Image: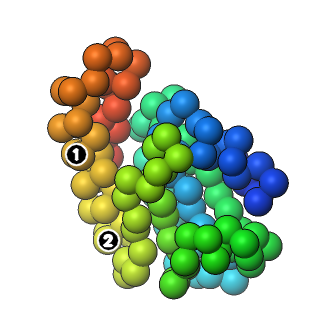
Amino acid sequence: MVLSVSERTFTQEVLESPIPVLVNFEAPWCGLCRIIHPLLLQFKAQCGEQIKLVGVNADQNFKLSNTYRLKSLPTLLLIENGTIQHRLEGFRGREDLRLALEEIKLSYSKESITYSSAKTADLGCRLS
């Protein structure tokens, strides 16, 4: 299940989150958004509690869409400690997204060596 976030709850659920958050900016009319949804759910299942997945309806949250300068949908932002760590946009389908999520996983696996907390050191999420 993906937590739906709005302008009212964005700061608390995303910017102040103690764990990294993958924000999926989407819209009901966006066909690619629907196509990638199962892949995002799989990514979330593999990451467990190490990463939070939230969805933002870009049409209903215009201020957030402007703040993050959305050019296309879907746009995915990985936000950690209130800062954008990765921005994924302009992918053409499931395979592009799968590769981008794999890249995120690998970058966190490399960074995990520098973390002293066992909770964050195991951030490498597995993709099939």
**What is the secondary structure assignment of the residue under circle 1?**
helix
Q: Nearer the viewer, residue 7 or 23?
A: 7
Position of residue 28 measured from the top left corner of the image (x, y, whole percent) = 72, 76
Judged left or right of residue 76, residue 2 is right
Assess disc 2: are there few (<14), some (14-19) or many (≥20) residues with their C-alpha within 10 Å of its C-alpha.
some
Which amino acid does the dot numbered 1 rest on?
Leu
**Colouring mode (rainbow / by chain / secondary structure / one colour):** rainbow
The residue that appears at 48% across and 64% down in the rendered structure is 76
The residue that appears at 59% across and 36% down in the rendered structure is 17
> Which residue carries the number 2 mark?
96
Position of residue 85 measured from the top left corner of the image (x, y, whole percent) = 38, 53
Mark yes or no: residue 34 visible. Answer: no
Label 2–label 1 contact, CB within 8 A: no
> Which residue carries the number 1 mark?
106
Question: In the rendered structure, which disc, 2 or 1, sits on the residue that comes first in sequence?
Answer: 2
**What is the secondary structure assignment of the residue under circle 2?**
helix
Assess disc 1: are there few (<14), some (14-19) or many (≥20) residues with their C-alpha within 10 Å of its C-alpha.
some
Judged left or right of residue 96, residue 10 is right
